[in-house]
Amino acid sequence: MSFRKRSPTSESPMFVRFDRASSPEDDGEYAMSPTSSSQSHHVTAVDYGDQTEDLEYSGAPATVGGFKLRSRKQPKRQATVYESDATCLPPIMVGRQRTLVLCFDGTGDQFDNDNSNIVNLFALLKKDDKNVQMCYYQAGIGTYATPGLQLPGMTTVVKILDDAVAWYLDRHVKEGYEFLMENYEAGDKICMFGFSRGAYTARALAGMLHKVGLIPACNLQQVPFAWQMYKDNSPMGWEMSKGFKKTFSVDVDIDFLGVFDTVASVGFFGYTLPFTASNYAIRTFRHALALDERRSRFKANYWHQPTHGQDNLGDRPEDKLKTIRHGHESREGHGTSKGYRKADRWRESGFSETDVKEVWFAGCHCDVGGGSTPNETPFTLAQVPLRWMVRECFRSNTGILFDIDALLEIGLEPENLFPEVIVPRPMPTSKLGYDFDHPDLASALSPMFDQLAIRPLWWILEFLPVKDRKQRAKDKAWYDSLLINLGRARQVPDHLEEIHVHRSVKMRMDAMGYTPKARGLHPRHIVWVD
């Protein structure tokens, strides 16, 4: 649980651990045993067994009883302070769960002179200690060289096919799956990020983990079979998945899945994979969406409520998937280590549905996911959703470790991230009512890159019929229709009571007279978020 205040003489982050005392007193105070009584420290987190509470600072860390409960009585406990790594945020706590972070880049994206937000986010991560965090990056669809193709021009042709129809989607998903197979240990927290088709890859990997589980290490020969069972939506496919998961796999959950503008379908064929639109194995889902994208092949893939049929599928097998969905997983046959229980505490606390937040941002596809501008460009629209995604990692208590210096470089002040504080909005310093030093203001007013205007060849695809898949609000059922897009903007889902729009959109509207292109953006439903 985050500590809410800090000593004004704080120099280095500290960690506090509470243990139950042998003779508890009902006075709501805690005794503390610091590692050093001669220094004042910035206490940032507490951990005392399997319980958590908010604490309020009321004295120097070396003072007995210096920590008091806000509004409840608890037995006295002993506290021990530990030093933490001052180069990363949040502080590395003793006994913390290790984090596995997987990043999947967008179509044609890799490290180059116009990096996407996936590369930029990966640059923010702490990567120097695999005992606390392991980081995996995968270049986007359409960037892979193909082993065995030595004929002149064939590699280029295959890359184009991969780009156009996600020819090697299975390879992208399976390679992420294999990383988890070889590195996951009980109690690890799994977090994923993706952009464009890389976002779909991340969601497909999460779906595969939910349906067939995670095979133990050193069983790579089973991965192709697991993939075939995952994508098989037939009744027999579900029965086979049930048996395969029970025989070979362990259950894992996804602690956080953050994606930038997921595309609606995979390639020209428009097929979908199980649990890519909703997935109870995901604790927190965050999605940054583009208000101004118009291309038919870049329709947004929104989060959907599961249909009644999907709920029934989720009940299979009854002794496994049903308990997973409703938060009472006993993990019979797979052990119940303390680390595993910690990883599923959100379920054991009564949470059974994914915490979902989809937020709209100004700009087109690459204005949200990055990659439209050279790396040296000081301000871009893509910086706004990147900062938002990092903030959501802290707000969701993911434990993902970020490099403090890297956070400062993108305009994020560590003290405003952890412990999470409410920062009062500054007094207006302009006629528009915004502070010109606000980190998102200059980015919000940056140029937009509409590919239909920049590259007219995209219009060829606008005259071809494309499948449009939607979900009815009443019964959550899916229905498909064919349409010719002709450059029409995206349709905001009409069943939403609240449409979350980032406050930077309002900045752009006030300063530039900007009008979002998305259809169905009714003002009475808009909720402005930071």
Image (cartoon, rainbow, N blue to C red):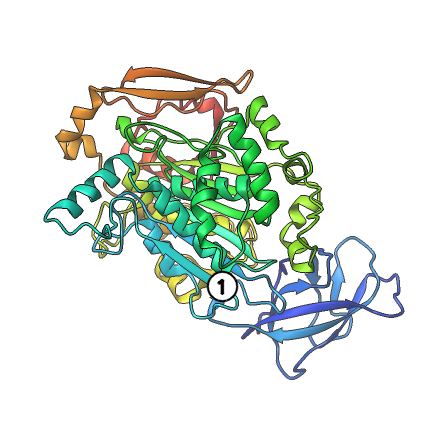
**Residue 10: percent from the left, percent from the top?**
57, 73
- Give the quadrant of the N terminus: bottom right
Residue 5 sits above or below residue 488 on the image: below
Q: Nearer the viewer, residue 504 or 244?
A: 244
> Does residue 431 appear in the picture of this structure?
no
User: Residue at 54% of width from left, 55% of height from top?
Assistant: 216
Tag 1: residue type?
Gln
Residue 337 sits above or below residue 498 on the image: below
Q: Nearer the viewer, residue 247 or 123?
A: 247
| Residue position for label 1 | 133
**Residue 194: percent from the left, percent from the top?**
39, 46
Residue 325 sits above or below residue 223 on the image: above
Q: Nearer the viewer, residue 383 or 477?
A: 477
User: Residue at 39% of width from left, 39% of height from top?
Assistant: 200
For disc 1, the neighbor class at 10 Å (few under 14, some 14 to 19, many from 20) is many
> Does residue 511 appear in the picture of this structure?
yes
From the viewer's perspective, tell me whether residue 344 is left or right of residue 105: right
User: Residue at 44% of width from left, 56% of height from top?
Assistant: 179
Residue furthest left as drawn? 152
Judged from the image, the secondary structure of the residue bearing numbered disc 1 is strand
